[in-house]
Image (spheres, rainbow, N blue to C red):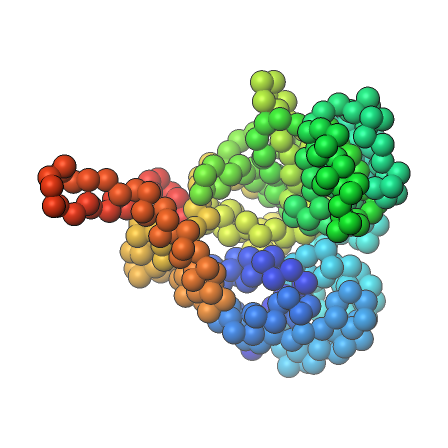
Amino acid sequence: MINFIVTGNCRRVVSAVLLAIRSFTDAKCIVVGGASTRSLRWSGLCKRQVTVDIDGGGDSAFVDIVHRVADANPHVILIPADCDAIRLANRVRASLKVKTTPIPALPTLDMFDNKWTFHQFCSGLGLPVPETMHFVSKDAMDFHAIVSAIGLPFVVKPLDRAGSTGVCVVRSAEDFDAAIMANTTYDYGPLIAQRFIRGDDVDVSFLSLDGRMSALAVQRASGSRIVFQHNPSLEAMAIVLSDASGFHGVMHVDARVEEGTGKVWLIESNPRFWASLPASVWCGLNFVAESLMPPPKGAAMRALVAGSASIRHPLVRPSAWQGMLADRGRRGRLLRAMAFDPPALGEFARELPATALRLARTRVPLKAWPGKASVVKLPGFRGNAL
């Protein structure tokens, strides 16, 4: 029996959703996604993978696939994992006969998935966002006008690209010319130029149900760990965003804590699931499970305010081996899924050279005796690190 249809274009995000599901159930999944998800056909986390153009060219095929699955599995639930999948679900919503996890309406999605309209929305609410300028293309940009308005350094970004694609930190006129204006491969547009906030990245993830905050977590990267913490300022901002937009679904908001002042600035939003999702699962808050089984109306918000999770592959962390073998709970299930799923093993193979280098750097002599070999000291992990 198929219980879940996970759809999306981004393999990393789809994989994170599959891991979150496996941590609490053996329910069967299928993936319906773009070409980048094809490698998941080898994954033990889904029963099969079906490649469909989910950017507008395969809507009818997608509906047919979903209905064939639903005819044999009446209780199947559709989980749109990324923004492309949410747009698809909105386009075919009237034709779908299956339950779908909470997703935002298309106008709300488009507003949060665009760096300029997100900036405008936050500004209208009085939320702290860096000074930002909008340009239809790089040809419309003038270095001296930007510096006069927002100062140096500043960041140039495409409006609708994920991750760090097209992101450039400009520290001088030479930087601007070499990285953007004279760079023929830099052909993004429209663009924003935004004041660079010196400080540390901090993110807030949440599930909102028709504007009511249901679950929330604030995370920061610390070396090879993701650390969860209480941040009243950022949590309050997330609640304002949720309430003012009537947001329905999950969102991951990028922010920065300014060096020296401690002020939190909102940078951009991702109105979808996120690649680091398994970290909160490890620490006790599973946003996929929360989306599948929303709490009753009036229930208190669930907040993850402490804990940490490693982002390294479990097989290169001896402290994780016992849990992989003996833990029958959600953490053990998550470790085994991360360690032994074929696509994950491929990532492990790619990580091996860096791991070997880290181990080489930790070599310390047991005793400075001539002719004696050195002993490798393995890095240790403490607390509740994944």
* For residue 171, above or below residue 339: above
Q: Quadrant of residue 256?
A: top right
- Residue at position x 46%, y 69% in the image: 342
Q: Nearer the viewer, residue 44 or 379?
A: 379
Q: Quadrant of the N terminus?
A: bottom right
Q: Could you tell me if residue 293 is visible in this image?
A: no
Q: Could you tell me if residue 120 is visible in this image?
A: yes
Q: Picture coordinates of residue 310 (x, y %)?
A: 43, 46
- Residue at position x 71%, y 77% in the image: 65
Farthest-out residue, top: 261
* For residue 178, above or below residue 108: above
Q: Nearer the viewer, residue 188 or 235?
A: 188
Q: Picture coordinates of residue 383 (x, y %)?
A: 35, 40
Q: Using residue 291 as the reference point, say whether residue 226 is left or right of it.
A: left
Q: Nearer the viewer, residue 115 or 301?
A: 115
Q: Using residue 330 as the reference point, say whether residue 322 is left or right of it.
A: left
Q: Picture coordinates of residue 12 (x, y %)?
A: 58, 58
Q: Nearer the viewer, residue 380 or 240?
A: 380
* For residue 73, above or below residue 118: below
- Residue at position x 74%, y 59% in the image: 84
- Residue at position x 30%, y 59% in the image: 326
How many discs appear? 0
